[in-house]
Image (cartoon, helix red, strand yellow):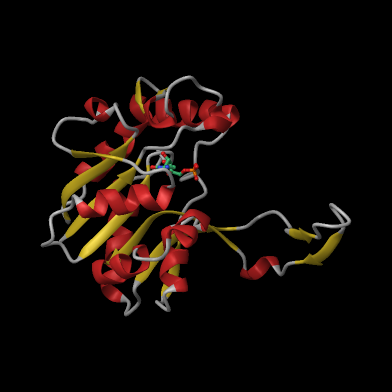
Amino acid sequence: MAVALIVAAGRGERLGSAMPKALVPVAGRPMLEWSVAALREVAAVTQIVVALPEGLLDAAPAGVVAVCGGPTRSESVRAALRAAAAADEIVVVHDAARALVTPALFSEAITELERSGVDAVVAAAPVTDTIKQVRESPAMRVSATLDRSRLWAVQTPQVFRRAALERALAAPAQLLAAATDDAWLVEQAGGSVALFAASAENFKITTGLDLQLAELLLGRRERG
Ligand code: C5P
């Protein structure tokens, strides 16, 4: 059985909205509620904990545990994990900003972790663009072109064995602040991480363009 943590405490500055990103309406409901609705369809998930911005815990949907998020994403995950019932051995971490996630993707992630011997499994989509690395100085001077066939853009859900995630989140504040995903912290702690293929439709709503696209796709799902 698994506990699910949704991190929803970011400000979402790149979206340019006055309200926190997770509460911005998308296709008729606050962004966060799409992920909560998907998780509620997953039989293996016994509890949902949501990290929200301070002062906005009332915005949590009924039936979920709400906690105050931290100043960084990893600290929000840590706060949510502390509030999660200790009985569940598997922890699902998901960004509220990935509102297009499906119940099937959560289930697949949990099954993948159970099947594999690794500490964490991560949903990811193959990179379609060619990725070039640049130097800091002179700025924008290309230093390498990476082998696209081995590059994957990672998403959430990221699913962990609880002990491995707890160990990873015990890292110093500086490392937590540098982390853009939790699997990286597990890697830093010497843990094993595997990817599994997910659809690019599970994109992170970051910009106004993403929001428009999500509105279209979720609106279409809603109409069946
Ligand atoms: O900033 P970014 O888009 O990478 O954030 C990913 C997710 O982490 C979002 O769902 C955001 O709400 C969450 N977050 C958080 N606490 C923070 C920063 C981000 O819960 N301090």
Q: Position of residue 21 (x, y in %)?
A: 44, 30
Which one is in front, 127 or 191? 191
Q: Is residue 52 left or right of residue 210?
A: left
Q: Quadrant of residue 63?
A: top left
Above or below, 143 against 35 in this view is below
Q: Position of residue 24 (x, y in %)?
A: 41, 24
Q: Quadrant of the N terminus?
A: bottom left
How many numbered badges does the structure rendering display?
Answer: 0
Residue at image x 31%, y 54%?
A: 78
- Residues 201 and 82: in front is 82
Ligand 1: give its quadrant. top left
Residue 107 x %, y % = 27, 56
Left or right, 47 with respect to 18, comes to left
Q: Is residue 117 left or right of residue 150?
A: left
Q: Is residue 103 left or right of residue 141?
A: left
Asked if residue 112 shows in the view, the reply is: no
The quadrant of the rendering that contains the C terminus is top left
Q: Quadrant of residue 168?
A: bottom left
Residue at the image point whose x is 49% and y is 26% from the top: 216
**Residue nearest the observer in this picture, 198 or 141:** 141
Q: How far from the left and from the top, in percent, is residue 132? A: 77, 59
The answer to whether residue 17 shows anywhere in this view is yes
Q: Nearer the viewer, residue 38 or 169?
A: 169
